[in-house]
Amino acid sequence: MMRGGMTLNVIEIKNLTKSYGNVVALDQLSLEVKEGEILGLLGPNGSGKSTCINTILSLLKYDEGSISIFQKEMNPSQYEIKSQIGVVFQDVAVFEELNVLENIDYFCGLYIKDKKQRKQYIHDAVELVGLQEFLKFKPKQLSGGLLRRLNIACGIAHKPKLIFLDEPTVAVDPQSRHHILEGIKELNRLGATIVYTTHYMEEVEQLCHRIVIIDKGKVIASGTNDELKNMITLDERIGFTLEEDNEKLVDDLKKMNNVIHVHYEEKTIHVSYQGKDDHLKSLIDYLSQNHIQYHQLYSERPTLNDVFLELTGKELRD
Amino acid sequence: MIVFKNYLKMTKNYIAIIMLYSAIFISFAVVQSLNQKATTSYQKEDIRIAIIDHDQSQLTSYFKEYISKNAIIENIGEDEESLKDALFFRQVDYIMIIPQSFGQDFINDQDVQISTMQIPDAYEAVYGETLMNRYLNTLQLYLKAGMDVSTASQHAIKDLSIEAVVHMESNIENNELSSVSSFYNFSNYALLSIIIVVISMIMVSFHHEPIQKRNLVSPLKTHTFQFQLILGNMSVAFGIWLIYIIISFIMYRQTMMSAYGLLYILNSLCLLIFILLFAFLLTKITDNRELISGIANVVSLGSSFLCGAFVPQAYLGQFVLNIAHFLPSYWFIKNNNEIALLTHIDYETIQPLLMNMGIILVFALLCYLITLLVSYFQRRKA
Ligand SMILES: Nc1ncnc2c1ncn2[C@@H]1O[C@H](COP(=O)(O)OP(=O)(O)OP(=O)(O)O)[C@@H](O)[C@H]1O
Ligand SMILES: [Mg+2]
């Protein structure tokens, strides 16, 4: 993966612009995907994630910009590049007429001609997504979660070097979600570079090495989880519940150093802090010095939602 | 050939449908051919002809002698009403009305005609007409050669009776021929419904957008993909067709092993080509499965009724037949019926059949052109 400290860019996109009529879906979007990483493309509904993936794959024409994959300019007849890519689309794409095994066999067969090798690959893919017990099932007989897993198996069975997954966990039960995320980590461990889109920030935090946040077709921030969180003023949020009402405390907290916001509701207080400091210790000290009784104390670091909120002024989800 | 193989694999899903239709089809064919053996096995002697002779000349009496050797002459009333009744109640199959001074005019080579009444499109009627025309044509030759009426007539009768012996032998087959025609007529329904449904459903799956996207991002070249799909379509359509051809060979070996069989197969092949291109067109226009199976039903049942696959064309009203002309099934079924009526096969007799096959192929070509047009507009819209 790493070559003498230098990491190769598997994908390079510069100033990509794409409109559907009047709707600008991608607006001067630039991004890089480094070899061996899991890149999370995070953005709310309609922010342009699918459009971005589809243009990268030459499924859509674009108005401006450039796309290169494996250091080559991408276009619809780059079959050599295509043979190294695996895609799991947002919509489930399987044949109703074929069972689980036949579906994987077909899509894998588009890439792998050798029958023996294909058999092995299919076996591995089935293991990865945990569909061993459903090989003879038709898609109609599968639950939503299992169907998503089949969709993934069909997209990655040929062991591609570069994998795109477009919201593979939408409407999936927790057990299948776990299977899917673990499977993706495993693919990455085995050497695949992964581009993962979602609007679930928890998934991105859990899975991705690097995150690109997009909104309205523009990149609004990118970096690792920590880098993104360091970009914003919010550093920590601390919450606790009082034994009895205390309006004065709220006023005092608001005047304190580094406090940017205090939220008070039914004896529960949330305090937002900025700047690197041991906010929790100074708060606890203050409360005990003033003999204030409290319980249910907790502290949390900013979430990606906070990052998104601060950068765009709106919530990531709806 | 992964796409092609996959296509065939998907066909497995439709085997139940294919079997169901085939089972219905075979039982129908068996019943039909049992019926046919029981009721319509006709020898030429069984054909009943009435001759209303307003001429009563020497020529016409020879003519009647000839007809009586080849059919049963029935005596019926001469007024229009009785004639119609006789036909309606099947007392006679064919009526010839010889006008006054027919004999004299015929000898003088004037434009004269025996007017006829018949049950439309019935085998018997066609047979009666053939008898009449042959005799008159032969007679005319001898008259032109300078013979008198009596000698010429005797020659004509003698000539034609030689052929009649040969003709007699082929009657065994004639008996089966009408069964084979019914079989192929009914296959119009089975082939249309099965092939349209199977091909369209599989094509819809391949055209389904998410799946199309998967194919597009794969290293498989678009034209390779298209080629394999078309190959799949053709193989499946051809395979289903072949099942029916084989059944016809099993049921009607004698006919199918003859030149008649070849004509039936050729005719059916033309229809197959049409069905294939029609199914292509259908999947270009819509990818709605319910709509497609609805259309398949309407087209197969509708065309079968309108064009006389279930009921002989002879029994259909003129209005229905006029509409039917715009359907390839009409020409297909017309051909099947006409094949059964052929007394002998040579280039001249099959020419009208080839014409009809050509018409079916023109319909197929039309489907193809519309498909191209639709693709053109779809691409412009994209
Ligand atoms: N085929 C299309 N025609 C017109 N507008 C489109 C089309 N596809 C997408 N859009 C618009 O482009 C924008 C980006 O859509 P896109 O599907 O790429 O977003 P997304 O981030 O993938 O959203 P989601 O999370 O809902 O999948 C949206 O405003 C959408 O309405
Ligand atoms: Mg999307």
Image (tube, rainbow, N blue to C red):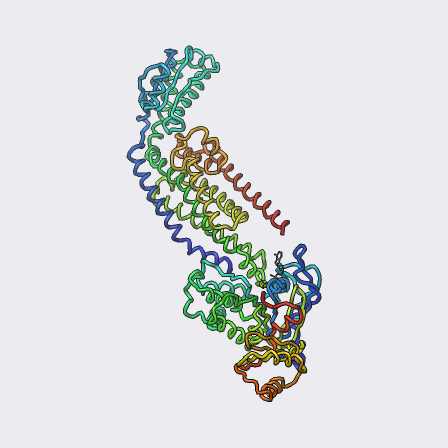
Residue A147 appears in the rendering: yes
From the viewer's side, name the closer residue of A39 and A221: A221
The location of residue A138, given as percent across then percent down, is: 43, 61
Question: Looking at the image, in which quadrant does ligand 1 appear?
Answer: bottom right
Q: Quadrant of residue A236?
A: bottom right
State the residue lying farthest toward the left: B38
Q: In this figure, what is the number of numbered marks? A: 0
Q: Is residue B236 left or right of residue B380?
A: left
Q: Is residue B247 above or below residue A299?
A: above
Quadrant of residue A203 within the rendered picture: bottom right
- The structure residue drawn at horizontal position 58% and vertical position 56%, both measured from the top left corner, is B223
Q: Position of residue A153 (x, y in %)?
A: 50, 68
In the image shown, does A54 or A77 lie closer to the viewer?
A54
Residue shown at the point (36%, 26%) measured from the top left: B162
Residue B251: % across, % down: 34, 43
Q: Is residue B203 above or below residue B254?
A: below
Residue B21, position as x, y percentages in the image: 38, 47
A266, A165: nearer the viewer: A266
Residue A112 visible in the displayed image:
no
Q: Nearer the viewer, residue A242 or B54?
A: A242
Height in image: B303 above or below B18? Answer: above
